[in-house]
Image: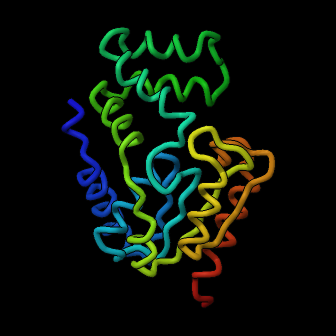
Amino acid sequence: HPRHYPLGTLAEDVRAQARTLADDGPVHLLGHSMGGLIARAAVLRGPDPFASLTLLSSGPGRLGPSSRWKVRVLRAGIPALGQRGMWRLWHPRPEHSEVGTFMFRRWMLSSPGQLRATGRLLLREPDRVEQLAATGLPVHVVSGERDGAWPVAWMDEMAARLRAHRSVIPGAEHSPNVERPRATAEALVDFWARLTPRR
């Protein structure tokens, strides 16, 4: 059921894992897309044990207007069509690439309640940029040149409000880590290297 996946519970899961990893040194937290909203919630519960937060293709709050209707259809369609039926509706032509196969497998292995809870979060999460800025944690905002979930201009503005480091990956869209992995990795490592004391 969607009530079993509240944002606070997901954020506490992130914090528990981070505390375990923190024994080996500072934890640089990265969240992609909705994962960025979860990562932000984890930081807002207390910036320790995090050394930084990277928001990858993730916006200041709920999705941009052009994406909201898709999520509303998804939330209504899963109970009626099932997960396989909704996948076929969104992907009428099968994609046999490694990424396409991974995405389909992940979709089918997710519980319907979790998928609907994700949709609710993406439609309702408020702008919490000011609260994040108040933590003082170093933030990196990364995106492609285009993004179908949140307008790139929203991410530019969010970075300015956070006084965050900003990276735009040329030739990438919503998943720069897949579309331009080398350039994305270089941007991430450059940011983390600035925050890591030299030995």
User: Residue, x 34% and y 68% (percent of image)?
Assistant: 44
User: Residue, x 56% and y 63% (percent of image)?
Assistant: 158
**Image vertical order of residue 70 relative to residue 162, above or below:** above
Estimate the x, y position of residue 16 in percent, counting from the top left: 28, 62
Q: Count every numbered label the image shows and give the total.
A: 0
Estimate the x, y position of residue 135 in percent, counting from the top left: 40, 78
Asked which quadrant contains residue 192, the reply is: bottom right
User: Residue, x 36% and y 12% (percent of image)?
Assistant: 82
Q: Quadrant where the C terminus lies?
A: bottom right
Estimate the x, y position of residue 41 in percent, counting from the top left: 35, 60
User: Residue, x 68% and y 47% (percent of image)?
Assistant: 176
Q: Which residue is nearer to you in this view: 21 or 100?
A: 100
**Image vertical order of residue 172 relative to residue 186, above or below:** above
Q: Residue furthest front?
A: 65
Q: Relative to residue 88, is residue 151 drawn left or right?
A: right
Q: What colour scheme governs how the chains and residues are painted in the rendered image of this protein?
A: rainbow
